[in-house]
Image: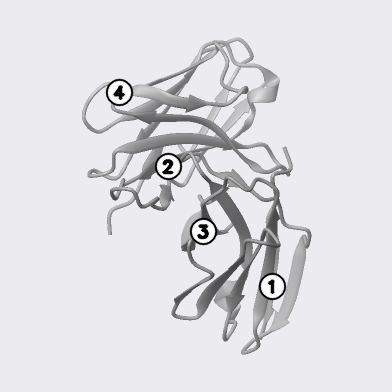
C-alpha cells in the first residue's frame, strides 16, 4: 500500500541553523501539507501546496519557512534560522483530490526536530 | 484556536464493549470531518470520515455520527479490541487544511 515517507526521522540542530525536512508524498496525490505538533499540544496546520504553489498558510508559517517541490516526487520544508520554539514533530501529508468530494489526508511518520 | 474540541482527554473501556469518542466544533463552515488514530512516535493514521451532507458513516467496526445542529460528532468502535488503544484525533476542514482536536487517549483493557 502506498505511503508517505519522511526523512530524517530525527534532526538535531543548533539555534540559528537552517534545516530541510524531506517528504515523499503518495505518487498520484495532488495536494501536499505540512503540520507540526509541539510536545503536549495539538497537531497544527502550517502550509498547503497545490499546483506548485502555496494555497494556504498559517500565521506560524512566517518568512523563516519555505516549501518546495524540487522534482516530481519530493516535497520539502525549509526553516532558514531555527529557534528553540521550532522544536516539534513535523508531519507531511498528502491528499488525492476526488472532484468536488473532499478526501482524506495521509500522513507520514514525522520528523522530530530538536533545536538546541 | 479552539474550533475543534475533544473534551475527554482519556477513555478506558473493556475489550468487547463499545468505545464512544466525542468531538465538538464551533465553525459552521466545516463541511468534512475525519477521525485519525495515532500511536506514539508515528504519524496520524486515517480511520474514517464523513461529509456534512450525511449524518452517519460506517466502516467495519467504526461508525462516525454527525449532528450538525449540535456541532457534534462521535466515533463508535464496536467491539473494542486491545489493539485499538491509541490516541484518537478528530479533525475538521472546509478549505483543505485540517483543524485538529486535542486528542483522546483510548485504553482498551483485555
> On residue A93, which mark appears?
2
Quadrant of residue B103 within the rendered picture: bottom right
Does residue A62 appear to the left or right of A22 in the view shown?
right
In the picture as drawn, the residue positioned furthest to the front comes out as B69
Which element type, helix, strand or loop, lies under badge 2? strand
The residue under the point 52% across, 57% down is B34
Task: Name the mark nearer the viewer: 2 or 1.
Answer: 2
Whole-percent x, y for residue A14 in the image: 61, 16
Give the mark, 1 or 3, whose residue is nearer the N terminus: 3
> On residue B107, which mark appears?
1
Distance Cα–Cα, label 1 vs label 3: 29 Å
Instruction: Report whether mark 1 lies on the same chain as mark 4.
Output: no
Which element type, helix, strand or loop, lies under badge 3? loop
Above or below, comparing residue B54 to residue B4 in the picture? below
Task: Name the mark nearer the viewer: 3 or 4.
Answer: 3
Whole-percent x, y for residue A27 in the image: 23, 43
Question: Badge 3 sits on which subunit?
Answer: B
Q: Which residue bears the numbered disc 4?
A: A52
Distance Cα–Cα, label 3 vs label 2: 22 Å
The residue under the point 29% across, 38% down is A30
Question: Badge 1 sits on which subunit?
Answer: B
The image quadrant where one finds the N terminus of chain A is bottom left
Which element type, helix, strand or loop, lies under badge 1? strand
Does residue A71 appear to the left or right of B56 in the view shown?
left
Distance Cα–Cα, label 2 vs label 1: 27 Å
Distance Cα–Cα, label 3 vs label 4: 29 Å
Badge 4: residue crowd in 10 Å (few <14, some 14–19, many ≥20):
few
Above or below, comparing residue B11 to residue B72 in the picture? below
Distance Cα–Cα, label 4 vs label 2: 15 Å
Task: Name the mark nearer the viewer: 3 or 2.
Answer: 3
Question: Badge 4 sits on which subunit?
Answer: A
Coloring applied to the structure: one colour
Amino acid at each position: 500500500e502506498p505511503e508517505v515517507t519522511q526523512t530524517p526521522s530525527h534532526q538535531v540542530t543548533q539555534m540559528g541553523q537552517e534545516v530541510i525536512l524531506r517528504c515523499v508524498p503518495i505518487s498520484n496525490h495532488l495536494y501536499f501539507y505540512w503540520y507540526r505538533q509541539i510536545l503536549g499540544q495539538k497537531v497544527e496546520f502550517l502550509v498547503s501546496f497545490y499546483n506548485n504553489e502555496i494555497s494556504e498558510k498559517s500565521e506560524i508559517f512566517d518568512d523563516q519557512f519555505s516549501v518546495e517541490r524540487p522534482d516530481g516526487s519530493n516535497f520539502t520544508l525549509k526553516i532558514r534560522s531555527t529557534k528553540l520554539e521550532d522544536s516539534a514533530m513535523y508531519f507531511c501529508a498528502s491528499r488525492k483530490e476526488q472532484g468536488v468530494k473532499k478526501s482524506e489526508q495521509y500522513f507520514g511518520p514525522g520528523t522530530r526536530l530538536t533545536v538546541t | 484556536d479552539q474550533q475543534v474540541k475533544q473534551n475527554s482527554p482519556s477513555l478506558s473501556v473493556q475489550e468487547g464493549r463499545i468505545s464512544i469518542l466525542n468531538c465538538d466544533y464551533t465553525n459552521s463552515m466545516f463541511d468534512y470531518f475525519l477521525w485519525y488514530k495515532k500511536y506514539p512516535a508515528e504519524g496520524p493514521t486515517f480511520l474514517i470520515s464523513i461529509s456534512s451532507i450525511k449524518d452517519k458513516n460506517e466502516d467495519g467496526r467504526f461508525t462516525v455520527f454527525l449532528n450538525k445542529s449540535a456541532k457534534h460528532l462521535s466515533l463508535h468502535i464496536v467491539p473494542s479490541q486491545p489493539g485499538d488503544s491509541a490516541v484518537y484525533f478528530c479533525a475538521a476542514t472546509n478549505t483543505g487544511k485540517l483543524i485538529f482536536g486535542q486528542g483522546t487517549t483510548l485504553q482498551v483493557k483485555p
